[in-house]
Amino acid sequence: MLDGFYFYGRDGVKTEGTCTYNADTSDATATASEILSGSSAYVNGNKINGSMVNNGAVTGTITTKAQQYTIPVGYHDGSGKVSISSTEQAKIIASNIKSGVTILGVVGDYSGEAVAVEANKNATPATTSQVITPSTGYDYLAQVTVQAIPYTETPNTYGTTVTIA
């Protein structure tokens, strides 16, 4: 019988109840980590003080394809969000995605750009190293031709004279 209430026994004697709880908690299984910090509950007749962290609104961002967001242990109020970072979202546009491919709901329309090929470029030999690059307006060179070194051979009494012009 609950504390503060009275009952009459078989012998007719009025008796005051002494029970301080009104529920059978013998089958309860909660642990301190499952009860919010600052709160308490009764388990098996024992008062348990909670130790679960209150994380409130948890937010996070994902910046790479393979990145995962780990949800922290504890209580969440349901208003948090995890999203793709705004920098990465800005890259997910139709012109950056191959035509016919859909990424995160964005249908690609990129079909490739024509490249400008400089078919042939001539280079004159030099006494120092040279870097041969495409002319302005071209993306790459198909072929580079290095001109022959101009020289002449003239026979003389001792052999051959070579003249490099």
Image: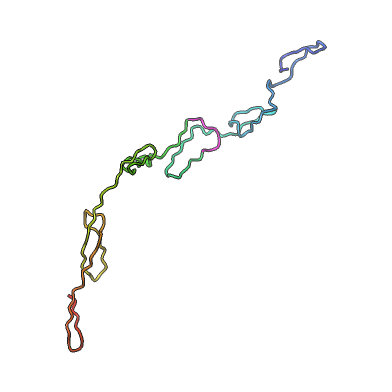
Q: Which residue sits at x=38%, y=42%? A: 88
Rendered location of residue 59, percent (x, y): 46, 36
Secondary structure character of the magenta stretch overall: loop
Q: Does the magenta portion include 77?
A: yes
The total of numbered circles placed on residues is 0
Q: In which quarter of the image is residue 21?
A: top right
Q: Nearer the viewer, residue 98 or 40?
A: 98
Q: Which of 100 and 31 is in front in this view?
A: 100
Q: Quadrant of residue 10?
A: top right
Magenta region: 71-78
Q: Which residue sits at x=48%, y=40%? A: 69
**49 shown above or below 163:** above
**78 shown above or below 3:** below
Image quadrant holding the C terminus, namely bottom left
Rendered location of residue 31, percent (x, y): 64, 33
Q: Quadrant of residue 39?
A: top right
**102 shown above or below 127:** above
Return the residue found at the far front.
100
Rendered location of residue 41, percent (x, y): 64, 27
Q: Which of 65 and 12 is in front in this view?
A: 65
